[in-house]
Image (tube, rainbow, N blue to C red):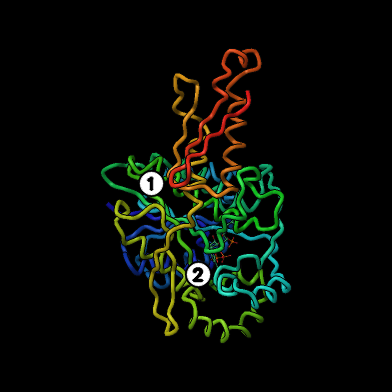
Amino acid sequence: MQKVAVVTGASSGIGSALCERLLQEDASLHVCLACRNLEKANATRNHLLSCFPSADVSIVQIDVSKMDSVLRAAEEIKARFHRLDYLFLNAGIMVNPRISLWAFIRGIFSRRAYQMLTTAEGLMSQEDRVTADNLQEVFETNLFGHFVLIRNLEPLLCCIEKPSKLVWTSSVNACKSNFSLEDFQHRQGKEAYSSSKYATDLTSVALNNRFNKQGLYSSVVCPGVVMTNMTFEILPPLVWKLFFPILWLFRLFTNTYTLTPYNGAEALVWLFKQKPELLDPLVKFHSCTTFFGKNYVEIRKVSRPLRVHCVVISTVVPQVTYASGYIRFRLQTPLTQKYYLRLRTLLQDENRNRAPPAQKQQEAPLAKVVLQVKKRPPERIKYLT
Ligand SMILES: NC(=O)c1ccc[n+]([C@@H]2O[C@H](COP(=O)([O-])OP(=O)(O)OC[C@H]3O[C@@H](n4cnc5c(N)ncnc54)[C@H](OP(=O)(O)O)[C@@H]3O)[C@@H](O)[C@H]2O)c1
């Protein structure tokens, strides 16, 4: 049976290069371009057909920043296909990205210089907008729209005998310090992009927990620094062209300057060829390019507090209540003070929600929580009722 790959954001940049490379790998694959702009999608389709005249390439219109469009596209995909083998969740935006020259100068002379040049951490700020769905545009585009698409395509994706793959184009810029459960759409801050990509990493882990048993596997990828429409919004193309030799030289120190969409798609294509059951759900797959232009994939553990976040998310609802009335949580990782305090706040809220005012007196023990943290001296907190 012909395999099917749906690629969101296939009309330009990494998405378009990915489609081309997928057809190079498997000319019999059906590639469905999921794009918001039909004109651009048709141009991509024509280009693909000029390279692979017998290829099967179709288009479905989707704007992932509009829920009604996502639902309509999901219905259309379900009407066209019986199953999906690959769903590449690649569409993404930054809104009005700006580089802070001051942060750059400060960073370049600090110990963070390497970190800053390889991840752009602390270097960029963006604006954000509110969509017609009353959500933050960056989060709705990069994460929520895709998540709703997955949930609506479950019948085509979940099959134990024949696993399907989700591949998210995340970023090395996904930074834990920019994500907060209290402001999970990053309404308040200036780094919505980084925050949305970190939330994407978390979502991928959560999807694996939920769907692996049903034959659906999720992975996250960083394409590296790639010259695309997205980067051209940060600085004009001419400036990038002037800096190109310097960026090329950066490859002496770091392998993340993939620079072309073809190179950036390396990890996505690599994942296309892997058995998803064998992949570690807690790693990110990085497209890398050596100084001499050789592409390869580097596997890096996602940052550690990710697991803490997952634990926090999964233990918000207490599961074991002892006869003594204590609720016990066991965490697999040591908590930093910051996450420890966050978890404590969540538990306090949970306690409040669990005991309605009338019953609060009788069910007072429910509001006592014991928190045990592995590898650190066990910490015991008794919450006030
Ligand atoms: N370039 C980099 O250095 C870099 C680094 C790390 C991660 N990434 C990630 O790589 C992915 C691809 O980006 P790119 O670099 O290839 O940039 P790009 O050339 O701007 O491609 C973005 C794609 O997403 C589509 N898109 C944007 N908003 C959409 C929406 N609301 N609904 C449907 N499609 C939408 C765009 O469609 P239109 O053509 O209609 O605008 C375009 O096809 C993104 O997720 C980005 O975050 C890029």
Q: Residue 229 at x, y = what percent? A: 60, 69
Q: Is residue 202 left or right of residue 192?
A: left
Residue found at x 49% / y 35%: 315
Kind of element beneath mark 2: loop
Q: Position of residue 352 (x, y in %)?
A: 62, 25
- Quadrant for residue 98, please give it: bottom right
| Residue ID at (59%, 37%) | 344
Which badge, 1 or 2, comes first in the chain's sequence? 1
Is mark 1 in CB contact (under 8 Å) with mark 2? no
Q: Which mark is residue 211?
A: none
Q: Secondary structure at mark 1?
A: loop
Residue placed most toward the observer, 216 or 319: 319
**Where 41 sits versus 365, above or below?**
below
Relative image position of residue 239 (x, y in whole percent): 66, 81
Mark 2 vs ligand 1: CB below 8 Å: yes
Amino acid on which disc 1 is placed: Phe
Which quarter of the picture shows residue 173? bottom right
Name the residue tied to disc 1: 81
Residue 80 x, y percent position in the rendering: 41, 46
Reply above or below: 380 against 48: above
Q: Residue at x 70, y 54 (%)?
A: 189
What is the three-letter code of the residue carrying label 2? Gly
Name the one closer to the observer, 35 or 327. 327
Q: Which residue is mark 2?
A: 224
Q: What is the C-alpha distance between the residues marked 1 and 2?
A: 32 Å
